[in-house]
Image (cartoon, rainbow, N blue to C red):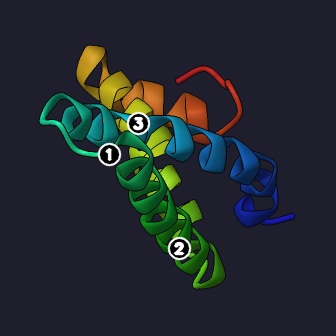
Amino acid sequence: MTYEDLFVFFYPVLYILGTLLSMIPAYIAFKRNKNFWVWWLGTTSVFVILLFAFIQTQAISKIIYLLAIDGARRFLEVAGDGECITYQIMEGGKDC
């Protein structure tokens, strides 16, 4: 089982979040007297197309890994004794 298999369950969540996040530029356009629905559909379609391309090239799981998992590991290294914590994570919780 690869880490790609773990992220396949999060793809629908990413589409939903992208649809909701695309409301931000649509709201800004609405405040500037532009059509909300045109901007919302436009930004949503761009997000969906890019997300689909990332998934097809298998780049999205690497991006999620870099942002979430690797970021948490680096935070733990900075927060405490970095070598000890990294060793515990990599070795399944064994003592240093």
**Callout 2 crowding tier (Cα within 10 Å): few <14, some 14–19, many ≥20:** few
Disc 2 vs disc 1: which is toward the camera? 1
Disc 1 vs disc 3: which is toward the camera? 1
Q: Amino acid at mark 2?
A: Ile
- Which residue is outermost to the top? 80
The Cα–Cα distance between marks 2 and 3, rounded to whole angstroms, is 16 Å
Judge whether 64 appears above or below 69 on screen. Answer: below
Mark identifier at residue 23:
3
Residue 59: where, in percent of width, then height? 52, 74
Q: Quadrant of residue 77?
A: top left
Label 1, on which residue? 35
Under circle 2, the secondary element is helix
Q: Amino acid at mark 3?
A: Met
Residue 78: where, in percent of width, then height? 24, 24
Nearest the viewer among 17 and 90 is 17
Disc 2 vs disc 3: which is toward the camera? 3
Sequence-earlier tag: 2 or 1: 1
Name the side, left or right, on which 81 lies relative to 67: left
The Cα–Cα distance between marks 2 and 1, rounded to whole angstroms, is 22 Å
The residue depicted at 51 percent of the width and 35 percent of the height is: 20
Sequence-earlier tag: 1 or 3: 3
Q: Quadrant of residue 29?
A: top left
**Callout 3 crowding tier (Cα within 10 Å): few <14, some 14–19, many ≥20:** some
Sequence-earlier tag: 2 or 3: 3
